Image (tube, rainbow, N blue to C red):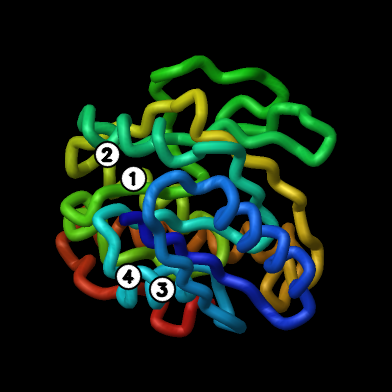
Amino acid sequence: MISVVIPTVEGREEHYDHCADAYARRTVQAFELITERDYPSVGLAWQAGAERATGDFIHLTCDDIEPHDDWATAAIEAVEQGFIPAPRVYGADGTPQSWPRQGQELTDWEPVYMTSLPFCSREQWQRITPLFTAHYYTDDFFSYRAALAGWEPRVRVGYDFTHYWAQHKRGAGMTEGDRMQHDGELYGTARAMVASGQWNSPWPSEGI
């Protein structure tokens, strides 16, 4: 079973409903939907939702994401091969927006430095966590921890999504640019904590 964790906030109900409905229609495997509402950051919501998860696999997503048909099959295959799946992400107009090369189609099993929509087995989860619980760079940190544990992110064709870029509360109390800079500095601190052996609980505790 797959545990799908969706953070959302008041004012994004339409996006959330579209997202939840798409997961319900396009997930072939057994799954549970875990919704975390009105946390101050995506990272805190992901950590809280995953702590409630009961599935064999954990998938961290967002309320403005739409999975494509049978999205999880390729992701599970990547995990079973010893990798972390990285998605192909498209804008609402169908243009490729996947990191690290927006505007270009990524190839199957291509190694990349991060996954923007984390997916892992429970065994992997136990070695990757605790999460970096800021608003941005949470997926970068997940990928960094996964790589340290020996699970390189690899692109999987079929692990495909559309991103609708909901703007309401996008910067979690700041402009998006200010939040990116703020959280980028926290991300650097988090990596230094890992390197020095001080990483043992979700941080920052308030998410900001």
Secondary structure at numbered mark 3 = helix
Q: Nearer the viewer, mark 4 or mark 1?
A: 4
Q: Please state the horizontal and vertical placement of residue 101, each as a whole percent of the image.
A: 61, 25
Q: Is residue 111 left or right of residue 65?
A: left
Among numbered discs 4 and 1, the one appearing first in the sequence: 4
Which residue is labeled 3 in the image? Answer: 49
Q: Is residue 6 above or below residue 38?
A: above
Query: How many residues crowd around disc 4 within 10 Å: few (fewer than 14), some, or many (20 or more)?
Result: many
- Judging depth in this view, the residue of 164 and 137 nearest the camera is 164
Residue at 19% across, 36% down: 150
Q: Is residue 206 above or below residue 120?
A: below
Could you say which quadrant of the image residue 175 lies in? bottom right
Query: How many residues crowd around disc 2 within 10 Å: few (fewer than 14), some, or many (20 or more)?
Result: some
Which residue is labeled 1 in the image? Answer: 144
Q: Is residue 42 left or right of residue 4?
A: right
Residue type (three-letter) at the residue carrying disc 2: Ala
Q: Which mark is residue 132?
A: none
Residue type (three-letter) at the residue carrying disc 1: Tyr
Which residue is labeled 4 in the image? Answer: 53
Which residue is labeled 2 in the image? Answer: 147
Could you say which quadrant of the image residue 9 lies in? bottom right
**3D distance between C-alphas at marks 4 and 1:** 22 Å
Among numbered discs 4 and 2, the one appearing first in the sequence: 4
**3D distance between C-alphas at marks 4 and 2:** 23 Å
Residue at 51% across, 28% down: 158
Query: How many residues crowd around disc 1 within 10 Å: few (fewer than 14), some, or many (20 or more)?
Result: some
Q: Nearer the viewer, mark 4 or mark 3?
A: 4
- Circles 2 and 1 in contact, beta carbons < 8 Å: yes
